[in-house]
Image (cartoon, helix red, strand yellow):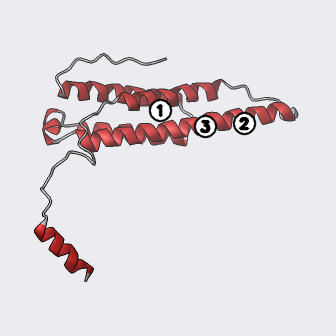
Amino acid sequence: MLNKIKSTIKAHFPAPEVQAHCDGPCGVYDPASARIAAEAVLSMTKKIMALDVPDPSNKEATVAYLNTVSRYVAIKEEQAHLAKTELLVLWTDYFKPVHLEQYPDLHDTFWKAAKLCSATKVAVSLEDATALMDAIQNIHNIFWSTKNRDVTYYTAS
């Protein structure tokens, strides 16, 4: 019964066909959001590595240390996930087949960058965090070249 009503409404009031490159046709894309998140990952990685492990017999210092490590790791995890999300949206929603013709390694570039996001969550690795920043710089350069714009890559820190 409900399907019949639905079909009748569609027949009398057909919706126009629309096309969009993403869920919402905003057209606003920029790899900067991925860079900012990755930069936070790099910063937290450096901060974790710089922490001094306290004497285990000093309960107060150990608790403070564990609290700080937990906070830094939570931020690193959150920002790595955010960077990955931002990269995947850019990859799947902005880039089109014409871009793949220009940059045949585009899929591999994004795949490896997404894998680096995961790697920075799995371990506390300055090498992986730095490689993620390098990958995002490469994506920045590719992205802006597809728009025929020369946008300087910079970091906040």
Q: How many numbered marks does the figure carry?
A: 3
| Residue type, numbered disc 1 | Asp
> Disc 2 marks which residue?
67
Q: Quadrant of residue 102?
A: top left
Query: x, y percentage for residue 38?
Result: 45, 30
Nearer-the-camera pick, 26 or 11: 11
> Disc 1 marks which residue?
128
The local secondary structure at tag 1 comes to: helix
Query: x, y percentage for residue 70?
Result: 67, 38
Number of other residues with Cα within 10 Å of mark 3, as a class: few under 14, some 14 to 19, many 20 or more: many
Q: How far apart are labels 1 and 3 at the CA level? A: 15 Å
Number of other residues with Cα within 10 Å of mark 2, as a class: few under 14, some 14 to 19, many 20 or more: few
Number of other residues with Cα within 10 Å of mark 1, as a class: few under 14, some 14 to 19, many 20 or more: many
Write the residue at 12% across / 56% down: 16
**Mark 2 and mark 1 residues within 8 Å of each other at the beta carbon:** no
Write the residue at 61% across / 37% down: 73
Q: Quadrant of residue 154?
A: top left
Q: How far apart are labels 2 and 3 at the CA level? A: 10 Å
Mark positioned earlier in the residue sequence (1 or 3): 3
Query: x, y percentage for residue 148?
Result: 16, 22
Q: How far apart are labels 2 and 1 at the CA level? A: 24 Å
Residue 127 appears in view:
no
| Residue type, numbered disc 2 | Asn
Mark positioned earlier in the residue sequence (2 or 3): 2
**Mark 1 and mark 3 residues within 8 Å of each other at the beta carbon:** no
Nearer-the-camera pick, 146 or 48: 146
Query: x, y percentage for residue 104?
Result: 18, 37
| Residue type, numbered disc 3 | Val
> Disc 3 marks which residue?
73
Nearer-the-camera pick, 98 or 29: 29
Write the residue at 15% across / 59% down: 15
